[in-house]
Each structure stands twice: as structure tokens, then as C-alpha cells.
Amino acid sequence: MLRALIWKELIALSRDLHGLAALFLMPLIFIVVMSMALKDVYSPPLASLPYALDLRDDGPAAKALAARWAERRGQPLLLTRNWQAELKSGQLKYVLIIETGFGQALHELKAPEEPRLRLLAEPGMEPALFQGSVAELMAILGEARARSLATRFLGTVPSGVADLGRFVSGERFEMRQHPTSVQHNVPAWLIFGMFFVVSAMAGLFVQERDSGTLARLASLGVPNAVQITAKAVPYLLVNGVQALLMLAVGIWLMPLMGGQGLSLAGVDLAALGLMIVATSCAAVALALAVASFVRTHGQASAVGPLVNVLMAATGGIMVPTFVMPPVMQQIAAASPMNWALSGMLDVLLRGAGPQTVWPHAWPLFLFALLTLVVAALRFPRRVRA
Amino acid sequence: MLEVRGLGYRYPRATAAALDGLSLVAERGSILGLLGPNGAGKTTFISHLAGWLPVTQGEILVDGQPLSVVRRRQPTRIAVAPQEYAFYAALTVRENLECFAACARLAGERKRNRVADCLAFAQLERFADTRASDLSGGLKRRLNFALALLPEPELVLFDEPTVGVDPQSRAFLLESVQALARRGVAVVYTTHYMEEIEAIADRALIIDHGRVLREGSLPDLLAQRAARLRLHVEGMDPVVLVELLSRFGAASAQHGDAVVELGPEASPAGVLQAVEAAGGQVRQADFGRGNLGELFMALTQRSLRD
């Protein structure tokens, strides 16, 4: 009985091209598009940002600083007469102005009255990129000032005195690989896609209730538990196929499209499997619960995507949680998609094992259990409706 | 086979009872026609038989056992053929039959035989590998019909099984229902088409507002209207005509016709003679057989239902 109903569901799914497209193609397209679109957020092309240099001090210190900047950020474009307009329109990302008296100020112990170095950025420049550029400029200036003062007071520049880079070390702790847009987008949109079964199942329930097939099965004595299980199992399988497909896209398709590839080297596959199963259980159980509440096709086609998009928006799928303000981060922590994403990122970025991701997995299993109970309690009403 | 005694049911928050002391009997090998306007309580009764609603007032017995016990032990003894196309549109005819056969706990050789028998019974063999969504309305009705018969039920309740089919398919379905009864199956048949009940039912039951208004064998029910003479007369004022007919029994004008319930002493020939003598020309006369539709309308009134 159960096998026949599961088989029927799989046959029906395989013949529903629109449904398959929604379940598989939609998250796949999201992964490709979002990964390509957000590629530069994770690795900004600093060296290729178009900028101009306004060298108002023609002393050697100013020229040396300009050269040092060009080493790191590429050669500047020609400063035109209407550079302000170019900056405002974004043609120039920024203009670096080295004011007159820069070299003199570098030698003085006292800080200048007015800044001698100015970085004017275009209005739309990303805050992190802007702040990073200013910080980098200050670091170069720091080195130049250390050299200048050492020369003035010591007559020489002792080895290492201006080598600020040796004072500071920045690295990601036990990083398996660089975080990339693919690294974030594959798990994020995979989770989104897995929860897309909410819409599919809600629509399916309405259709089967309206057609009387749910009632016919009930009149044949098919227990509610069998009916619910027969719906859940095929969609758990669908989630599994989605996961394999999305990972494959990240690993093989993205590099072919010029993006960065997803690497599973060093990933604990058991932990990855645990997170996929936990996410799938939560998604399918939520789908069953929502399906047991909706009454019409209109409700099914509205409620499913609404639940999905709300959870994705608040759960860090559409916007990474770390860029959210504290209040939104607290809200995100209440979204099952966020639990799933945190666990997946732990597995993919931090090489976490099953025990490490269990704190992310068990809330998903608990959520699945609770929503399944709701679905089981509501299901008989749906059959009678 | 099936005995319903004083069945009552009121939906939550409803002001009136959907079923109010409904009683009926359905025997093996016979067809019970169930008639009632919208809102009469037919769907509520079907929902009880199908096990979708609990029996809260009265009782439903199957061979003397409570329905709940029978449904728990052998749910497939009773089948409901719903009005909707209750099958999977994406599956073929055969796949649907196999799926529902498995759900009816049929397996192995018996399952294969039942699928083949039902395909043959509903004459669907040629369409076995056609997707249900691609079937015509008549074929969909036949598939719906075949699915109900898969587990060889002892009682089948058909809920308006001929809605929206062509005359040929309707005739086929009606013959199939009769064939089913001849095999010893108890059939309860609900419809809004009076002529279908007249054509196949052994007994009929007219219900409204959850109560039985009239119940009996079809000849008995039709005989109740056998003394009615309906005339279409030209050349006479309708008021004068009704006055004339009143001498023979209770007379009235209905839809351009004059109708008289003949008294014990009156004969149709006497009425016709009197009308012609009064200068009327009888263009049409109807006497000697009752009409279920008229009985139904008389009992359930003409007011529109929700």
C-alpha cells in the first residue's frame, strides 16, 4: 500500500515538468546567477578599480607614496578636467589627492592641521571597500612616515622599522578554503530549494482533496499515517536529488562558467549528510503542515512561496547574516533556514564534523517533529473538507 | 445488508441538522435510488457511509454490525464512487487501477485479475495505457466507476455517476449498475436525474432537510400519481376548464395544462367527454403512470435551494 502510493507519487512527479522545473531548475538558476552576481563581494577586484591621482606635491615622498599605491592598486587613469563629474557618475571609483606639503608633513612630529592625503570615493562605493581602501592608505602612509622620521632622527632606516606588515598577521583560523560567493550561495539556495517543496506539497494536497482521491483512499481504509508517509518519502528523495544536483553545480558547473568552484576536499561527508537530512526533514514536515492548512489552490500558491521567501529573507539565505544589524541577526536565529545554513557553512567552510554541527541539526529535527504532529492532527480534517 | 436507523448529524456551528432521523434499508441485489435537492443531506449521508464522518446520532448497521466495526475490519466491503474524478490525472488508467488496488490491500494474482476484470467491466482495455488526464468525460466516469469496483465491495454508493456524460456513456453506466446489482451487490444510487432512478432503481427514497419524505418500491411510488389526468386543451378558457374538471376531482392549472386528481368514481373517458361537450379540443392527455419528477417537486417544493 505504502509502496504503491510512493511509486504513484514518483511517477506523477516525473511527469510534471513544471513541478520539476520549480523544484530543481529554480534553485539551480539561483545558485548560478547569485554566485556570479556576488562574486566580487567576496573577492573585490581592488587592483582593477578605475581611479585617478591628483599629485599636488611633486616631492619625492609624494611620488614614492603614489608609486607604492600603484603597485597595489594598479596604474591610475589620467586626471581630466571634469574628474568630479566622472567621480560622481561612478566612472572613477575614487580619486587619490596628495596635497601640497605632504612630504613636509611627513617629516614633522606634529600632525598636520589639515589632512595631506585625501581619498574621494564615488557615492555608490561599497562601505567595506571604501573603509578598506582608507585603511590601506593609512597603512602605506604609516610605513612612509616611519621611514621619514627614522631618517630624520637616526640618519638611517634600520631594517624592519617601517615594515608594518611584519607586525600584523591576519588569517582565517583553520580555514579550509577562501569563502567565496559559491561557498555561500550553494548551501543557501540549496536550502531555499529544499524548502520549495512547501509550495509543491500544498498544491498537491489541495488538488488531491478537490479531486476526491484523499477521500477515496480514506474510504478504502488507508490509514492517515500511510497517506502522510507516502507524501513525505518521495519529497525526501526529491530533496536528496536536489542536494546532489546543487553540489554538482557548485563543483563542476560554476568553474566552467568562469566562477569559483565549490570544493568538498576536507569536508566531512557524514556531517554534510546529517545537515542535508535534517534540513530535508524540516522542509518536508513544514510542507505537510502548511498543506494541511491551505484550502484552495490560490492559498497554496500564495502561502507556500510566502513562507519560503520570508524564512529565506530573515534566515540569511538572501542576505548573509553577518551583514545584518543585531536585531535582524536575532530574528534570523529563529528561522529554520538559518539553522540549516549555519550548519552547512560550518561543514563546508570550517570542516565541521557531525558532533560539531549537531547543535544546528537537532533543532531542525525537533522542528520537523512538531510540524509533523501538527500535520497529522490536521490531516483528517483536510480529507473530510 | 445496510440498515440506517434514525441517523442524525449537525455540522459544527450549523443552525439546522444536516441529517434528522434518516432511516433506510439497502438489500443485496437491489438498487436503492436516493433523491433529494441540494442541501437535502445526501452528501452528509455519503460521508457517514464512507467513514469520513462519525455516527453521532442513530446507527448504521451492515449485516447487523455497526458500520464503524465493519469499516475498521473490512473497509473495502463498502465502496463509494464519488461524483468527482477521484483518481490521479498523471497516471495511466492501468496505473490508477493498480495503485488503488494496492491501497485496497489486493496483491499478487488477485490484484492482477481484479485490474483486468475492472478494465473489462468498464470497457477500458483500449485505454489502459492512456493517461487519465487525456480521457474524455465519459471515459473518466468509467474509470471512476471501475475504481470503485476493484475490491469487489458488497455495497456500492454511487454519487451522481453520470454527471456530464453523453447519452451513450450514460446508458452504459446505468446498464453496468444494473449488472452489478444482478451480481448480488447492494447499490445506493444518488442522482438528480429522475429518469435514471425510474430506469434502474428497485426502490426509491426522497429526502429533504435530512428527513425521509417518501420511501417505497418504484411501482408503489409511481402508482401514487396514477389517478392524475393531465390535459392540454385548446378552445376553452383555463379558468372555466379548471372549474369543469373540479367536478371529477381536485383540479388545478399547471404550466398551461389542466391537472385533475380523479376521484374514485371518475374515469378519464368521462372527463374527456365533458371537455369536448364544453367545446374544448383535447390536444394532449396523460394518464395512468406517475412521474417521479412531479412527486419529487411536490414533496420538496419548488423553492430554489442553496
Image (cartoon, coloured by chain):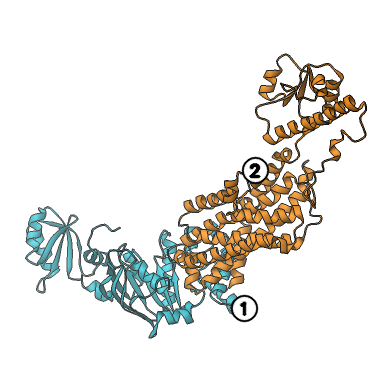
Image quadrant for the N terminus of chain B?
bottom left
Residue A217 percent location from the top left of the image? 50, 70
Question: At 68% across and 33% down in the image, what residue appears?
Answer: A126
Residue A341 percent location from the top left of the image? 66, 53
* Residue labelled with disc 1: B108
Q: Looking at the image, which is closer to me, A20 or B111?
A: A20
Q: Is any atom of residue A20 visible in this view?
A: no
Tell whether B270 sits left or right of B56.
Answer: left
In this view, which residue lies farthest toward the top? Answer: A81
Specify the chain shown as orange.
Answer: A
- In which quarter of the view is residue A4 placed? bottom right
Q: Is any atom of residue B47 visible in this view?
A: yes
Tell whether A88 sits left or right of B35.
Answer: right
Residue A49 percent location from the top left of the image? 76, 29
* Residue labelled with disc 2: A323
User: Circle 2: is it few (<14), some (14-19), or many (20+) Cα within 10 Å?
Assistant: few
Instruction: Please count the marks in the image.
Output: 2
Tell me the amino acid under the disc marked 2. Answer: Val
Image quadrant for the C terminus of chain B?
bottom left
Question: At 84% across and 40% down in the image, what residue appears?
Answer: A167
Q: Colour of chain B?
A: cyan
Secondary structure under tag 2 reads helix
The dot on residue B54 is: none
Question: At 56% across and 65% down in the image, what residue appears?
Answer: B93
- The alpha-carbon separation of the residues under discs 2 and 1 comes to 61 Å
* For residue A133, above or below residue A192: above
Tell me the amino acid under the disc marked 1. Answer: Gly
Query: Which mark is in front, 2 or 1?
Result: 2
Residue B254 percent location from the top left of the image? 17, 58
* For residue B251, above or below residue A91: below
* For residue A71, above or below residue A198: above
